[in-house]
Image (spheres, rainbow, N blue to C red):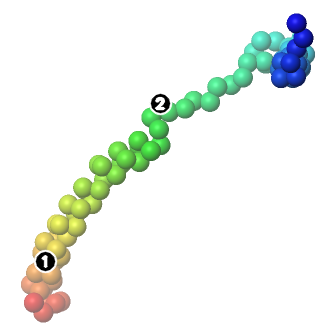
Amino acid sequence: MAQTPAQRRANEKHAKGVEKRMGKPESAIKKKETKRSPVGIAAVVLLIFVVVAPLLIEQLKVLPYIWGLIRDALAKVGLVSG
């Protein structure tokens, strides 16, 4: 049975790889695996949004109250008329 052109290219590619590895120790041949997170970037962004956004909104609700306290304290000292 004759090889197809795709099979021939695959065989040649494999042969080149085997040829490059000949005579080299196993540790030099092994490819280093890149560590990937099991959680996708989109999931992390969504989690941060879900956790951080309510905190920021709550701070914006508290901000007028804190500003009022600061203004009252400055009025007591006499730096601001109030």
Residue type for callout 1: Gly
Quadrant in which the N terminus appears: top right
Front residue of 34/71: it is 34
Q: Is residue 29 above or below residue 58?
A: above
Residue projecting furthest to the top:
1
Residue 33 falls left or right of residue 47 = right
Query: Badge 2: few (under 14), some or many (20 or more) residues near its Cα, within 10 Å?
Result: few
Front residue of 37/17: it is 17
Q: Is residue 1 visible?
A: yes
In the rendered image, residue 20, in percent from the top left (x then y), is placed at 88, 19
- Kindly state the secondary structure of the residue where label 2 is placed: loop
Q: Earlier in the sequence, mark 1 or mark 2?
A: 2
Q: Is residue 65 above or below residue 1?
A: below
Whole-Å distance between the Cαs marked 1 and 2? 47 Å
In the rendered image, residue 64, in percent from the top left (x then y), is placed at 16, 74
Query: Badge 1: few (under 14), some or many (20 or more) residues near its Cα, within 10 Å?
Result: few
Q: Which quadrant would residue 62 be assigned to in this image? A: bottom left
**Residue at image mark 1:** 68
Residue projecting furthest to the bottom:
81
Q: Residue at x 47, y 43 (%)?
A: 41
**Residue at image mark 2:** 38
Q: Is residue 17 visible?
A: no
